[in-house]
Amino acid sequence: MHPFARGPVFAVAAAVGVALTAVSGRYGYFGDELYFVAAGRHLDWGYADQPPLLPLLALAMDSIAPGSVAVLRIPATLAIVVAVVLSALLAREFGGGRRAQLLAAGAVAVSPGFLGTGHLLATSTIDPVVWIAVTFLLVRWVRTRSDRLLVVAGIVTALGLQAKFLIGGLWVVVIVAVLACGPRELLRRPALWTGGAIAVLATIPTLVWQARNGWPQLEMGRVVAAESVYAGGMLGFLPLGFLLAGLVVGTALGIAGLGWLLRSRELRFLGIVALGVTLLFMVSGGRPYYIAGVLPLLWAAGAARVERQRPAAWWRWVPTWPVYAVTAAALLLGNVLPVQPVSAHADQPLQIGNFQRDEIGWPAMVADVQAAYRALPPELARDAVVVTGDYWTYSAVQVFAPELPSFSFARGAAWFGVPPEDSGAVVFVGDPAPIAGAFRSVTRIGELDNDERVANLVQGTPIHLLEGRQVPWEQLWASARHL
């Protein structure tokens, strides 16, 4: 086996870490990050839309440096740095030397799917790194037959299940692939099932929470499938997957790696795993970035093949550093990272991939909610509450105006509490239709404006004053709550 190219690989990882750190505090919180902070302030064993790891991380980072977006994103940056190193180690396990290891590490470094999500603290940042670690341990087991690796894989899986349940799908496909083409010896190893037991035991508290709350995660899966239309549904799954892979570099290495794995008798199951996971999420309505965790496996295999066997003339130019450099420059100049000034996003239409819009203007929007609340007559303000129709705005109010009694019946926030029964008027942010019929009067009193002319998902959201509630909150919540 070739030695680990420690210096060059760590240099690539460090460059990625520096780039992400440099822009981590440039705009502001992304909507989901606000939600994780708010969820962390309602810490529990589970949530309607996720396991507890991300809220716990957000709580820890926000406790260290309250209000610091840059500190909040440190775990995300570290996750991508680890992904770079693990990808190089995967290439080494496939027999790759210095060049192969650098090609695999560089593929992660110039992938929009990793660099873009690495800018944000999100489940889509943490989950793929767990997948890479598990596939690395499996590949290493194939080479060494060291069973302790399988126990470690179970521990890593246990951690991953605290961020997202998707890795369970990976293991299902792995078992099917091994049954189909081997090595079936893997399934006879007690260490594999010991690791599986560790993963299951670690997940019991979250499963108990789900059971006690009616298994909202199952409904959340159906919601995600319905929302997949934003990415073109099944037709858009693979094109967006190629985009996340990094177009030329990621696609070429990935195809080369897949072909090599499928031709390898001992490693064929890994190629089937990559295909099976892609098919599973495409058919079930998953989002394209769900397959990010298997991409470094293919890149590492492709890099090892390229090092051993010179590519055909028509694509020999792809796995070269000039192409990597051009790809990296394109990422920095595009919308993958928030390099441009805020004004560059002004008046842009909503479009897939420009997530930076939703990092802009949250304090100004919350100021609009505060202004509407403070403008209430004293007799109304005494027992008034704020209710929002979306979980992002609710989370922003929780973070930037914690003094306001705020609630939401949207997504996971709906499980954080119900307005007290003795509350009065409602400052409602959003479309009040789900609960308007329970009030005697509904009056529009303002709207959200981030003051930046940037069209994000909640810009222009109306603010209403609802008075004269005629239905108990518990009943209203039960009818209005949605994912």
Image: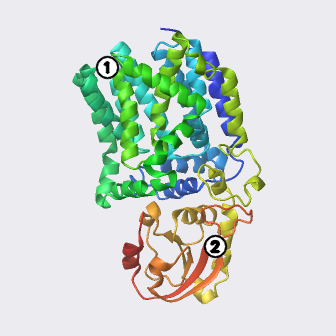
Q: Position of residue 332 (x, y in %)?
A: 71, 38
Q: Which residue is mark 1?
A: 147
Does residue 186 appear in this view?
no
- Residue 217 is tagged as none
Does residue 415 appear in this view?
yes
Report the residue at 59% width, 52% height from top.
352
Alpha carbons under labels 2 and 1: distance apart = 57 Å
Rate crowding at label 2 as few (under 14), some (14 to 19) or many (20 or more) other CA atoms within 10 Å.
many
What residue type is disc 1 on? Asp
Report the residue at 65% width, 55% height from top.
359
SS label for mark 1: loop
**Relative horizontal placement of residue 6, taking residue 282 as reference (left or right):** right
Q: Is residue 333 above or below residue 437?
A: above
Q: Which residue is mark 2?
A: 369
Q: Position of residue 48 (x, y in %)?
A: 40, 58
Q: Position of residue 284 (x, y in %)?
A: 36, 48
Q: Is residue 64 above or below residue 370?
A: above
**Relative horizontal placement of residue 408, taking residue 209 as reference (left or right):** right
